[in-house]
Image (spheres, rainbow, N blue to C red):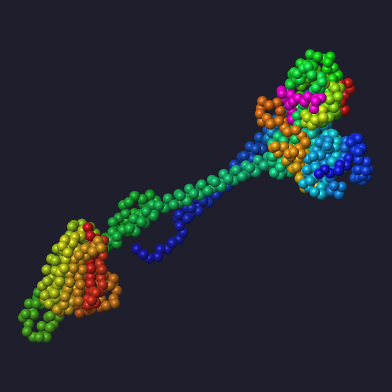
C-alpha cells in the first residue's frame, strides 16, 4: 500500500500541546495561589507577634500614685528579636501626650475604639515598618485617660522570609509543571497506541488477506474500523465476483471451443483442397490458443481461490516433478526435445500440492513451448540454502535485457513469444503460488546464455 | 614595633611625664586636631604615624588595654593611624547622637547602647568572613559585632579572707554578709548604676535573672556600701583594703591586673555569671569606611579565633558556654536590651535599686 496521504496536523501533537498548555496554566495558578496564601499567613503571624508585644506593653501601663507609668516587660521587645533581626520601635502616649518611646513614630489616627488593634504599614527612619496600635482607658483621679501603645518593627526579616517563600512557591510550580508535562507526554503517547497497533496489524497483512478486522479497538475507533470492514468486504465481494465471472466465462468458452476444434479436425480430414486445409489449420491453431488462455484463466482463478485458504500438506517435490516430467514427455517428444531430470531424493515442502503442481506445470509448459526443435530442457529438484528448489532450464534464447520482474505480471509476454500460443499468465501463476507459500520465483538467463532458468523456491519444512 | 602614643593631657597626664618633647608635640597636635567637643572625653590619643590617614574610633575601653590589638592592626595596614577617643558609654552615645564629630567606629561595653545605635539607624551593616565567625547571639543584624566576652565577677580582698573560704555563690555571699554585718559595714562596693552604663546593664540583667539579686542588694544596702563609677576604681579599692568585697566587677579587668594578683581574689559566681560582650559598630557617615571595616574584621578575628590571638587583651571566654550546667551566660544582643533603656523603665529601676541600697538623694 503505497501512495501519498494528505496529512494535516497530528492528534498526538495537538493533544500534547493542549495538555502541556493546561499544565502551564495550572502551574501558574498554583504558584500564585500558594504565594498569596503563604504571604497572608506570614504577614498574619508577624502581625500577631507585634500584637502580643503591644498588648504585653499595654498591660504593663498602670496608675501609681495618680500617675500613669509604664513598665515594659523584657519579653515584649525580646520576643520580636526572636522572630527576626529587625529594628524595633515603640511609643506610649497618654491622652495624646508622649509617655515614653519614639515620639516621631508614625501612627495613624486612632479609631478611638478601645481594644481594637490597628495595623499599618509606614515609612520610618528610611525603612518600611509595620505598626500595631492598641489603646485602653485608665482612670486617673476618677477621670478616664486614653492610653495608646504602638509597637513597630522593620520588615527586612519578613522580606527575606517572603523571598524564600516566593522561591519555594516557584519551585513547587515548576516541579508541578514538569511532572504534568511528563504525564501529558505519556498520555498523548498512550492515547494513540491503539491507532498504531491497528495500523501495524493492517500493514502486516499479506496482499490477499481481505479478512475483516476483528481485534478489539477503543470505542472511538469502532466507527472507523466498522467502515474499514465494510470497505474490505465490499472489495472482497467485488474481487471474487469478477474472478467468478472470468472463470465462468472461461469455462463457458472452453467447452464450445472443444466442440468447434473437434468439428474442425473432422472437417480437415474430409477436405482435400490445399487452400482450405491451410485455413482449417489456422483455425485449429487459433482455437488452441483461445482454449489454452481460457485454461490458464481457470488455473489462475483456481490459484486465487486456493491461496485464500491455503492447505498445509507435506509435499514430495521430487515425486511431483518427476510425475509432471513423465506426463509432458510425449509433448516434448513431438518437438524432439530431450527432458533431463535430476533430483535429490525426497525434497520436501509444506503446502498445497495441487497449486505447486500447477505452478511447476506452467513453468515446464512454457519451457517446452518456447524451446526450438531438437533442444534440451533440464529439470532439477534440490535443497539449497534452506530452500527447496525446482529449477527448469531451457535453450529457448532467454529473456534478453527485459525486466524479468515484469514477466510475472498478468498478460505480459516475452519478446520471443510472438510466434507461440500463450496468454502470459503462466509465470504469474507460478509467482502467486510461490508467494502464497512464503516462497519466491527466481527468473534469470541460464549460465550458458542459451536460454532461461526459472526457479521455484519454497521454505524447507 | 610600637608606635609613639600621643595622648590628650586630661586624665592621664601623669603617664606622659617621662617624655617631655613628645608631650609638647602631642599638645601641638592636639590643639591642631581637636575641635571643641560637647561631650566629655576621658582620653584622646593619636596612635600610629603622624601623617597616617586617621581612622576615628570612639570607645569606652582604655587605650592601654586595646593598644596591642591596635598596634597589630596598624602593622597590617600601613599608612593608617588610629584617632582614639575614650569616653564613658553614655558620652559615647551622646557624641554619636549629636553627630557633630564624625567617627568611623564605636567600641563599647554597653551592649544596650550599641543595640540602640543600631536600632535607631546610626550604624551601617557589614558582612565578611570574619563576622561570620561570631555566634548568633554575639551579633545583631550585621550591625553590632561582639569581640570579647567578659564576666561580671566578684572581687574579694585577699587580706580580708585569709581565714575563711570566699563565697562562690550569691546566696553564700548573702549569708556571709548577714552573718558578719559589723565586719563588712562600709566595706562592700558595687557600681553606681546611675553613673555607669555597664553597672546598669549588669544590674538589670541580674534583676532579670534572679530574685537573689534583690536580696543581695538589700543586704549590701544595709551595710552602707560604697558606690563606684568604674571597675578599675573598685579593683584598686579592694587591693588597697578600703573595701573587702566588690560586686559586679569586670573580671577581665581584675584578672589583667597581674600586679595586684596577690591582693585580690576574682570569683565568677557559680550560680550564674553574666558575660558582657564588648562590641563594635560601624558608624554611618564615617570618612574611612574601608579602614573601619578592616578594623572591625581585625577585632572580631582576634576575639573569635580559637586559640585566641596573642595580641588579644582579654582573658579567654569560658570554654563551657554551650554547657547548660555552666553558670556563664552571655548577655544576648537583641531588641530586648532596649527595654531597660526606656526612660520610664530606667526611672522605675533606679528608684527600686536606690531604695534597696538606701542611698541618700535621687539619681540623675
Most foreground residue, A383 or B3: B3
Left or right of B136 in this view: A422: left
In this image, A314 relative to B269: left or right?
Answer: left
Q: Is residue B10 in the magenta section?
A: no
Quadrant of the image occupied by residue B269: top right
Q: Is residue A370 above or below residue A97?
A: below
Q: Measured from the top left, where is residue B53 in percent x and y?
A: 83, 48
Q: Is residue A300 visible?
A: no
Q: Is residue B85 left or right of residue A58?
A: right
Residue A409 visible somewhere in the drawing: yes
| Residue closest to the far bottom | A274
Q: Which residues are magenta?
A: B261-276
Q: Quadrant of the C terminus of chain A?
A: bottom left
Q: Residue placed at 85% from the left, 47% from the top?
A: B49
Image quadrant containing the N terminus of chain A: bottom left
Q: Nearer the viewer, residue A44 or A387?
A: A387
- When asked about the image quadrant of residue B131, the answer is top right
Q: Nearer the viewer, residue A439 or B176?
A: B176
Amino acid at each position: 500500500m503505497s501512495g501519498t496521504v494528505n496529512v494535516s496536523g497530528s492528534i498526538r501533537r495537538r493533544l500534547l500541546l493542549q495538555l502541556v498548555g493546561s499544565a502551564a496554566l495550572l502551574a501558574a495558578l498554583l504558584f500564585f495561589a500558594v504565594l498569596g496564601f503563604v504571604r497572608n499567613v506570614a504577614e498574619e503571624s508577624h502581625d500577631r507577634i507585634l500584637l502580643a508585644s503591644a498588648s504585653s506593653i499595654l498591660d504593663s501601663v498602670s496608675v501609681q500614685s495618680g500617675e500613669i507609668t509604664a513598665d515594659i516587660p523584657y519579653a515584649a521587645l525580646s520576643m520580636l528579636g526572636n522572630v527576626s533581626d529587625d529594628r524595633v520601635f515603640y511609643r506610649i502616649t497618654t491622652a495624646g501626650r508622649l509617655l515614653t518611646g519614639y515620639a516621631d513614630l508614625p501612627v495613624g489616627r486612632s479609631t478611638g475604639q478601645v481594644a481594637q488593634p490597628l495595623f499599618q504599614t509606614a515609612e520610618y527612619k528610611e525603612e518600611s515598618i509595620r505598626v500595631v496600635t492598641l489603646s485602653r482607658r485608665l482612670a486617673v483621679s476618677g477621670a478616664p485617660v486614653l492610653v495608646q501603645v504602638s509597637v513597630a518593627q522593620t520588615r527586612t526579616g519578613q522580606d527575606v522570609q517572603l523571598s524564600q517563600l516566593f522561591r519555594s512557591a516557584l519551585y513547587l510550580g515548576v516541579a508541578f509543571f514538569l511532572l504534568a508535562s511528563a504525564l501529558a507526554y505519556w498520555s498523548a503517547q498512550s492515547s494513540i497506541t491503539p491507532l498504531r497497533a491497528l495500523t501495524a496489524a493492517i500493514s502486516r497483512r499479506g496482499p490477499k488477506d481481505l479478512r475483516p478486522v476483528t481485534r478489539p479497538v477503543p470505542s472511538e475507533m469502532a466507527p472507523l474500523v466498522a467502515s474499514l470492514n465494510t470497505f474490505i468486504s465490499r472489495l472482497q465481494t467485488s474481487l471474487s465476483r469478477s474472478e467468478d465471472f472470468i472463470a465462468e466465462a472461461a469455462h463457458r468458452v472452453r467447452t464450445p471451443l472443444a466442440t468447434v476444434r473437434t468439428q474442425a479436425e473432422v472437417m480437415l480430414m474430409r477436405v482435400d483442397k490445399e487452400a482450405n486445409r491451410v485455413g482449417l489449420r489456422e483455425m485449429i491453431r487459433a482455437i488452441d490458443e483461445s482454449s489454452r488462455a481460457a485454461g490458464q484463466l481457470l488455473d489462475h482463478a483456481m490459484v486465487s481461490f486456493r491461496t485464500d485458504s491455503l492447505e498445509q500438506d507435506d509435499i514430495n517435490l521430487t515425486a511431483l516433478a518427476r510425475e509432471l516430467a513423465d506426463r509432458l514427455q510425449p509433448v516434448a517428444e513431438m518437438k524432439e526435445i530431450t527432458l533431463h531430470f535430476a533430483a535429490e531424493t525426497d525434497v520436501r515442502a509444506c503446502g498445497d500440492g495441487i497449486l505447486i503442481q500447477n505452478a511447476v506445470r506452467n513453468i515446464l509448459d512454457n519451457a517446452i513451448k518456447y524451446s526450438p526443435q531438437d533442444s534440451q530442457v533440464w529439470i532439477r529438484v534440490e535443497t539449497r540454502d534452506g530452500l527447496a528448489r525446482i529449477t527448469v532450464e531451457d535453450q529457448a534464447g532467454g529473456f534478453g535485457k527485459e525486466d524479468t520482474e515484469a514477466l510475472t505480471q498478468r498478460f505480459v509476454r516475452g519478446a520471443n513469444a510472438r510466434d507461440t500460443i500463450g496468454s502470459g499468465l503462466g509465470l504469474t501463476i507460478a509467482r502467486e503460488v510461490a508467494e502464497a507459500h512464503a516462497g519466491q520465483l527466481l527468473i534469470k538467463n541460464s549460465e550458458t546464455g542459451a536460454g532461461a532458468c526459472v526457479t521455484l523456491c519454497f521454505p524447507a519444512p | 614595633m610600637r608606635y609613639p602614643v600621643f595622648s590628650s593631657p586630661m586624665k592621664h597626664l601623669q603617664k606622659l611625664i617621662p617624655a617631655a618633647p613628645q608631650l609638647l608635640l602631642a599638645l601641638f597636635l592636639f590643639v591642631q586636631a581637636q575641635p571643641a567637643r560637647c561631650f566629655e572625653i576621658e582620653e584622646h590619643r593619636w596612635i600610629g604615624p603622624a601623617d597616617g590617614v586617621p581612622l576615628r574610633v570612639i570607645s569606652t575601653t582604655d587605650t592601654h588595654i586595646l593598644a596591642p590589638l591596635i598596634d597589630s592592626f596598624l602593622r597590617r595596614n600601613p599608612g593608617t593611624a588610629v584617632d582614639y577617643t575614650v569616653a564613658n558609654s553614655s558620652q559615647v552615645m551622646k557624641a554619636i547622637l549629636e553627630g557633630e564629630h564624625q567617627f568611623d567606629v564605636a567600641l563599647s561595653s554597653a551592649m544596650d547602647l550599641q543595640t540602640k545605635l543600631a536600632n535607631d539607624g546610626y550604624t551601617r551593616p557589614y558582612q565578611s568572613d570574619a563576622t561570620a565567625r561570631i555566634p548568633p547571639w554575639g551579633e545583631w543584624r550585621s550591625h553590632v559585632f561582639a569581640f570579647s566576652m567578659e564576666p561580671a565577677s566578684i572581687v574579694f580582698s585577699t587580706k580580708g579572707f585569709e581565714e575563711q573560704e570566699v563565697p562562690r555563690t550569691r546566696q553564700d555571699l548573702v549569708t556571709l554578709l548577714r552573718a558578719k554585718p559589723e565586719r563588712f559595714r562600709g566595706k562592700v562596693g558595687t557600681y553606681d548604676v546611675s553613673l555607669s552604663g555597664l553597672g546598669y546593664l549588669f544590674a538589670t540583667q541580674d534583676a532579670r535573672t534572679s530574685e537573689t539579686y534583690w536580696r543581695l542588694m538589700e543586704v549590701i544596702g544595709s551595710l552602707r556600701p560604697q558606690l563606684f563609677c568604674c571597675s578599675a576604681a573598685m579593683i584598686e579599692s579592694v587591693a588597697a583594703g578600703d573595701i573587702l568585697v566588690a560586686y559586679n566587677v569586670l573580671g577581665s579587668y581584675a584578672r589583667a591586673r597581674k600586679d595586684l594578683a596577690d591582693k585580690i581574689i576574682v570569683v565568677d559566681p557559680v550560680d550564674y555569671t553574666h558575660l558582657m560582650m564588648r562590641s563594635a559598630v560601624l558608624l554611618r557617615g564615617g570618612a574611612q569606611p574601608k579602614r573601619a571595616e578592616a578594623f572591625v574584621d581585625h577585632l572580631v578575628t582576634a576575639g573569635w579565633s580559637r586559640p585566641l590571638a596573642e595580641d588579644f587583651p582579654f582573658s579567654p571566654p569560658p570554654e563551657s558556654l554551650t554547657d547548660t550546667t555552666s553558670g556563664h551566660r552571655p548577655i544576648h544582643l537583641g531588641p530586648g536590651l532596649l527595654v531597660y533603656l526606656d526612660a520610664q523603665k530606667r526611672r522605675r529601676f533606679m528608684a527600686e535599686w536606690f531604695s534597696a541600697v538606701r542611698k541618700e538623694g535621687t539619681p540623675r
